[in-house]
Image (cartoon, rainbow, N blue to C red):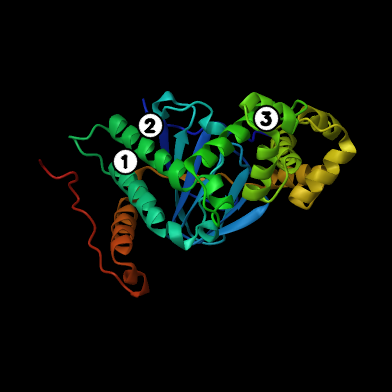
Amino acid sequence: MKGNIKPDTIPDTPAGISIYSVTREAPHHHTGFLEILYCLHGPVTVTTRSQEVLLHEGELVSLDPFDIHYTSADTENLIVSFYFDLTDPVFGRDDLDMLYFMCEPLAIPESKQEELKELKRLLLTMLYFHCFPHPKLPAGPTATRFAVKIVDMMLEHFHFFDFIARYMEYSPDAKTLYENILIYIQKNYAEKITLGKMSDTLHFNYKYLSRFFMTTSYRGFPRVVMDVRSYMSSILLLETNDNVSDIAYKVGFTSPNYYYRVFRSWTNTTPHRYRKEMRRLQAQAEENRYYDPKEKKEELEHFILFRFAELQVPELIDMSFIPFKGLPDAWPPDA
């Protein structure tokens, strides 16, 4: 029933990188970690938040700390997952692991395409120095600097608020308020939460907060709270054998029947069926095959070079063949 997996990190850094291939992965999540899954060779299917995201080569998806997900593929594939420990003080913020991000192919608007390219450049460069370290760039500090830049970029451009308010004009203060509201709900979802109590805690007018919810998320405050509670209950369904009624009360629902209705509207299935399906997927899962960068040296070289070229000259994607010779066998070159 293990669903929470702590990623291996690069020593003395808040970041980790895994290179692997999948067949049928078990459902899991990474408490405290933001994961960015980058498809090198595919396609692969990432199932998350009750939806499937088909990733083709060169596409990526972000996965939040409490986001239960699993990846599967029927053909040969190669994936790189980047992990960022959002609880690490190097990022300079408390409660960063309680925020949500949104970065996946169909959710990124045209207005964010340049930012997406820059994010990919940062990830590819981080991957490059991880696979082919340079003697003048120590692995730990180099990885940490890239991690800070990448997380800053996710916060600035791929925050969940940017997604839900993408058709609106809003100020930085609105984004900060949304973060404070989300953090408050995450910390108190198991208790009785009211808009009045939260407005007093955050020192905002009750009517203003009510209008804020409706204009930014098109949902009222109670619905947002119910979504968070359903989200957290899915983790307990995956990781424990607790009675479903007990789980309903643990995450703040006033009755099991109300929980069943809300959960079904959120996932299109019942809590019992959700748990049964997660257990089935866990039982049928196959171990991922993880690679040392040296095992995939040529493939990694070609991928990094091609994707960098594609970001600079997009029409390369339409060419049927790009002849790459890769990097010299002796790398890094003598300084």
Report if residue 37 is visible in the image: yes
Quadrant of the image for the C terminus?
top left
Amino acid identity at mark 2? Ile
| CA–CA distance in space, label 2 to label 3 | 41 Å
Q: Which residue in the structure is indicated by mark 3?
A: 199
Q: Nearer the viewer, residue 232 or 1?
A: 232
In percent of width and height, residue 324 lies at: 25, 64
Q: Nearer the viewer, mark 2 or mark 3?
A: 3
In this rendering, is residue 209 above or below 250?
below
Q: Nearer the viewer, residue 165 or 331?
A: 165
Crowdedness near tag 1: few (<14), some (14–19) or many (≥20) residues, C-alpha within 10 Å: some
- Horizontal relation, residue 121 to residue 154: left or right: left
For the point 59% across and 38% down, which residue is it?
29
Q: Amino acid at mark 3?
A: Ser
> In terms of depth relative to the viewer, which is nearer, 21 or 306?
306
Name the secondary structure under disc 1.
Answer: helix
Element type where label 2 sits in the image: loop
Three-letter code, disc 1: His
Q: Quadrant of residue 82?
A: top left
Q: Position of residue 165 (x, y in %)?
A: 57, 51
Q: What's the residue at 62%, 34% (across, down)?
A: 181
Residue under numbered circle 2: 10
As drawn, the label of residue 130 is: 1
**For marks 2 and 3 on the same chain, the one whose residue lies earlier in the sequence:** 2
Disc 3 to disc 1, C-alpha distance: 46 Å
Asked whether the residues under the numbered discs 1 and 2 touch, taking CB atoms below 8 Å apart as contact, a structural biologist would say yes
Q: Earlier in the sequence, mark 1 or mark 2?
A: 2
178 relative position to 15: left or right: right
Q: Residue 316 location in percent, x, y? A: 32, 70
Q: Residue at x 68, y 29 (%)?
A: 198
